[in-house]
Structures are given as C-alpha cells and as structure tokens.
Image: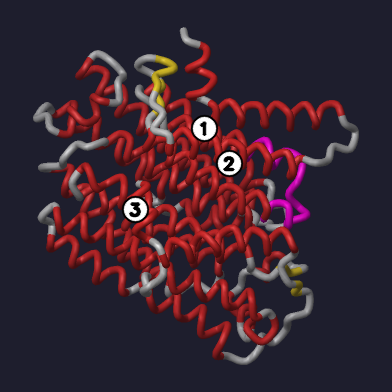
Amino acid sequence: MNWGVVFIGMLPENLLLLGILLLIVNEIVSDRPSGASAYSLVIVAAAAVAAAWLGLTGYSAVPFAGQFSVSPTGSLAKAAVLALALPVLLMCRDDSEDSGPLYPLLLSSLYGLIIMLSADSFLTLFLGLELMSLPVYVLVMLARRRPQSTEAALKYLVLGGAATATLLMGMTMLYGWSGNLSLANFGRALGSHDPMAIAGAAMILLAFFLKAAVVPFHTWAPDAYEGASVPVTAYMAALIKAGAVLATLRLFGQTALSGTMVDLLAVLPLASIVWGNLAAMRQDNLRRMMAYSSIAHAGYLFYAFLGNGPGRFQAVMFYLVAYGLMTLLAFAVVPRHADDQQRDQLEQLKGLFHRQPYAAIVIGLSMLSLAGIPPLPGFIGKFLIFREVMAAGYTLYAVLGLVGSYLGIYFYLRVIQFMFMTPQAVTTSGETPPRSAALLASALCLVPALYVAIFPGRILAIL
C-alpha cells in the first residue's frame, strides 16, 4: 500500500475525518464545549479546497484497488458538494437550537457522501450511502421546537431502511450474476438480457430513486422537510439529493441506455416532475412546498440519464450546483420567528418586501431560478438537461418534461406575489430578520449563483 497516495488522494476524506475526531474530543474533554461551528467551517472549507485542487490539477490515483479511486471529475464533484455545505454550517450557527451533536453528525454525513463519489465497488458504495444517511435520521429528530420532528424522523428511517434493503437485494442479484461486487457490473447489466441482471440493476436504481425522493418513492420528503430544522431541511434538499444523484451517476458512467431502463428513467422522473409541481401548488407551508419542488427537481436530474454518456456529468453537475445554490439561498434568509411553527407559513411572507427587502429580493431570485426563468442559473440547468435528452433522440420525453416544468411556475410566482404584491401579514410579532451568519450564508450562495448566471461557459469549461 502506498501511504502517500492514500494521504493525498483521500485528502478531503482525511480532513473531514480529522474534523469529526476533533469535534468528538472537544465534546468529551470540555465541560462547556464551544467552537464546534468554527471548527466545522474551517475543516469543510479546507476539504473543499483540497478536492478542488485535486480536480483542477487532474490528479488520478487508486488508493485501494477495486474499492476506491480518485479521478478529476470525482474530485470536482466532491468540491462542489463540500462548498455547498458551507452555507448550511453557517445557517446552523444562526439557529441557536442547533448545537451539541449536530456538527459531528453533519460532518459524518458529508464524509459518507464523498466516499460514495470515489467508490469502485458496491461494498464501498453501500458503506458511503449508510454513512451519509444514518446521521440525517438523527438530525431530523434534533428539531425539538417542532412537535412533528420525531414522527418525521421515524418515517424517514423506515423508508430509508426500505431503500437500503432494496439496494442490498439488487447488489445480491448482480453478485449472483457476475460473481463480484464491482460497480462496472451495473453498466454491463444494463446491456444484458439476463433477467437476474436486469432485475438487480432495476432494484439498485429504485433504491436511489427513494433516496432522491422520486415519485412514487417520495412520501418521506414533505414530512421530513417540515419536521426538521431549517438548516437540516436545506441540507437534505441540496446535499442529500446531490449525493444520491451523483452516486447514481457513478453507477451509470458512460453507459448508453436501451430497452426497459429507458422507460424506467423516463416515466418515473416525468411523473415526479408533474406530481411534484402539482402538489406544490396546494401547500401553505414553505418547507412542504420546497419538498415537492425538490421532488420535481429530482425528476429533472434523473431525466439527464436519458442523454448520451459524455454529456451526462456536465448536465447533472451544472444542474446540481444551480439548484443547490438557489435552494440554500431561499432557506438562508427565511425570517426567524419566535414560534417555529409560524416561521415558514406562506402567510408570514405576505408583505415581506416592505419589512425585510433584502430577504424578499433574495427569496424572489431563488424562486425565479428554480422556476427556470432566464437568464438565471436554473434556466441554464434545465436547458442542458433537455438538450441532452433531445440529443439522445428522446424528443417526445423532452417535450413532455418541458410541459411538466411549466406547471411549477405558478407556485414559485405565488411566493413572489405574497412577498411583493400583498398587504402585510395579520401578525408579524415575534419575527426577526436573519442574523449575520445567515446573511453570510446567503452571500456565499448569491455571489456564485450570479457568477454562474453571467459566465455559464466558464463553469461548463471546468466540467
């Protein structure tokens, strides 16, 4: 074993592991532990810089043959995910309720997420997936100010367990068919006519559909998003979804699709787009609305898998960056409220522009981008997705997906109408503006989002 390769190639993972250990030791040795937020920010920022350096310098290595490898594209994906985690950590700092075990759990989940992005075997992929998922079940339950948090965590745990069981069954079938646990077997199974191989690949894909909340495996998302604290909801919406999609992307690689898998990757994501947008129209709670919005966006992301192999990574990564930045931006500036139940009611957003202009403008930009209005990043992301689908010859699916995406414009504009075009809410007592940490989190999202909108070509050139 080359320890230099293990140290350099796994530098982002090693830094996160160091951060987790420091946070745990700090908790043990100190009667009144402090500084967890600062430690976490520094460690995650360092890991993001390390991943970006590995990606931009073209570093490739195989620390553990057959199990874990490092590639420039994988390192860039890690850098993007870790960078998106920084605003979440700042939002946690803004939320006085979030302390104690929150930061070690968040870093543990991030550790599992980036492990998946370098996995070469189903064993490593499964380990990363569980490390990513298990801490989040606890994080949902930490929202003690929301009475539904325990129920939401239980629902998430049960359905997450179902996803794990489905993944294990699919892995077992592929192992029985091929005799090994290499991820490359998934791509071979897609082109196979063996019923066991096809069934195994389908079950693995369905497990990731459940993790990403694709219809009809989406029912955990609205309850979990509503039951968690705002930072944890933002983490699930942006980063957990990114982890599930990027892990699926690693499974598919450059493999072209055909037969049954095309229908599976077209029909269910299309249903997710349509149902997510329709259900979001009826929500009066911002977090539940964003949950259904994320269900629709999961459909767009998996639509990209219909495209040809070489363009898949570029389209998915750009969309994840655009979607993640704008989703985190919306959550970062939601006004605080003494009653956490009232904080994210849409009624509370009425007349927000007259009380907190910056928060209203930022949320408005986020809504327009998520709706796909040009020239914001969300529009460019959707353009790349549907361009890939049409280039692969699935014009009908592209048209149906585009029509389904128009349904979402209504509920995004409804939020803007509440903030800018309606009288002030009946009661705004207990409402306070975002604190400095939340404002910094919004700046960390807004500045790169504007850069992506103005210079998309530069981002695509890197990808």
- Residue at 35% of width from left, 16% of height from top? 66
Marks 3/1: CA–CA distance: 27 Å
Q: Secondary structure at mark 2?
A: helix
The outermost residue toward the front is: 57
In the picture provided, is 143 more to the left or to the right than 33?
Answer: left
List the residue tagged with mark 3.
460
Residue 137 badge: 2
Coordinates of residue 367 in the picture (x, y in percent) = 47, 72
Q: Residues within 10 Å of mark 3 (few under 14, many from 20)?
A: few
Q: Earlier in the sequence, mark 1 or mark 2?
A: 1
Q: Quadrant of residue 280?
A: bottom left
Coordinates of residue 457 in the picture (x, y in percent) = 34, 58
* CB-based contact (under 8 Å), mark 1 and mark 2: no
Residue 112 badge: 1
Q: Nearer the viewer, residue 383 or 410?
A: 383
Task: Give the residues drawn in magenta, as a range.
Answer: 91-106
Coordinates of residue 306 in the picture (x, y in percent) = 20, 49
Q: Nearer the viewer, residue 6 or 360?
A: 6
In the picture provided, is 386 more to the left or to the right than 53?
Answer: left
Q: Earlier in the sequence, mark 3 or mark 1?
A: 1
Instruction: Judge whether residue 148 can be spotted in this image.
Output: no
Q: Is residue 95 magenta?
A: yes
